[in-house]
Amino acid sequence: MSDLGVELEVEVQEEAQEIPILFLHDVERHYSQGDATLNILNGAELALWAGQSVALVAPSGAGKSTLLHLAGLLEHPDHGEVYIDGKATAILPDAERTRIRRNEIGFVYQSHHLLPEFTALENVLMPQLIRGLSRGEAKTRAVELLDYLGLKGRLNHRPAEMSGGEQQRVAIARAVANAPRILLADEPTGNLDVKTADHVFAAFTQLVRASGLATIIATHNMDIAARMDRRVTIRDGLVVELD
Ligand code: ADP
């Protein structure tokens, strides 16, 4: 394991293993569409333990993004609770939810969402500076992460000067820059060709395994899903294990 893996590794105490790092309990999310109500999540349960990877495989419109937004504290459920490391989050003030989101949760989206006017290095520095790390500490970690993801030669490139696969690897580095405990990925290779997707996904899984992160990856790609620890889908508003 590289130095980075050791550094990123989450210290999991034995008793802590009994508590999921993420637990969606009896979660409901409904949207109105004209006169109708869409019951996207309707009593959903999902427990995720440290170090575990879960593929969320469901057709478009089934509620994958909705589930990830709730898990990532970007939205509130209409009913139920989202526990992060055993802590109920619904009643927390927004500032505390933001703190948890910034420190404990990383996001990777289908589009990289990198800041176009900044280099790869600066994009990975940014979340760490916002968290309060010194520029020196943040830079050391950003360089290490980008190197780990095979981007040593791209540190000073802006997004437009990189390929789609490289952009997405920078986005992964940025997502884990603050050493989160949970990584949520919404179709992270959806915009890439098959070969590039495979390359990016290999980097993603290597990082996840080395760091002990818990991850949910929403994907249509069955090859990717097959390489995760668990596969789940959303059916009738519930999270259902696929095997
Ligand atoms: P997926 O990620 O699986 O494609 P989403 O979670 O994005 O699915 O959306 C699930 C369903 O909820 C879709 O039918 C979508 O149109 C609907 N939906 C999502 N967000 C909203 C919203 N803010 N208002 C109304 N309907 C929404």
Image (cartoon, rainbow, N blue to C red):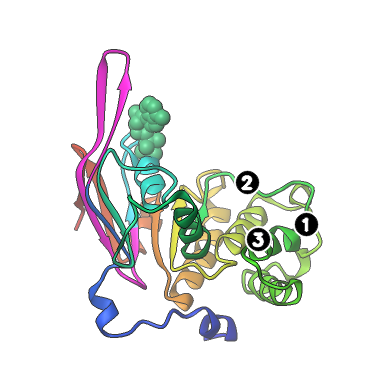
Crowding near the residue tagged with mark 3, few <14, some 14–19, many ≥20 C-alpha atoms within 10 Å:
few
Q: In this view, does 155 lie to the left or right of 144?
A: right
Closer to viewer: mark 2 or mark 3:
3
User: Which residue type carries mark 3?
Assistant: Ile
Tell me which amino acid carries mark 1: Thr
Residue in front for this viewpoint, 208 or 50: 50
**Residue at coordinates 25% horizontally, 23% vertically from top-left?**
37
Q: Which residue is drawn at 51% across and 50% down?
A: 189
Give the residues drawn in magenta, as a range. Answer: 27-54
Query: If you read the primary sequence from the N terminus, does the residue marked by circle 3 or circle 1 appear first?
Result: 1
Point 50% across, 45% down: residue: 190
Residue 37 in the magenta stretch? The answer is yes
Q: Is mark 2 within 8 Å of ligand 1?
A: no
User: To which residue does mark 2 refer?
Assistant: 113
What residue occupies the far top of the structure in this picture? 35
Q: Mark 1 points at which residue?
A: 119
Q: Quadrant of residue 138?
A: bottom right
**Disc 3 marks which residue?**
130
Disc 2 to disc 3, C-alpha distance: 17 Å
Residue 87: name its quadrant: bottom left
Main SS, magenta residues = strand
Q: Position of residue 14 (x, y in %)?
A: 27, 85
Percent across and percent down for residue 8 are: 52, 78
Residue 208 in percent (x, y) is at: 46, 70
- Asked where in the image residue 177 lies, by quadrant, the reply is bottom right
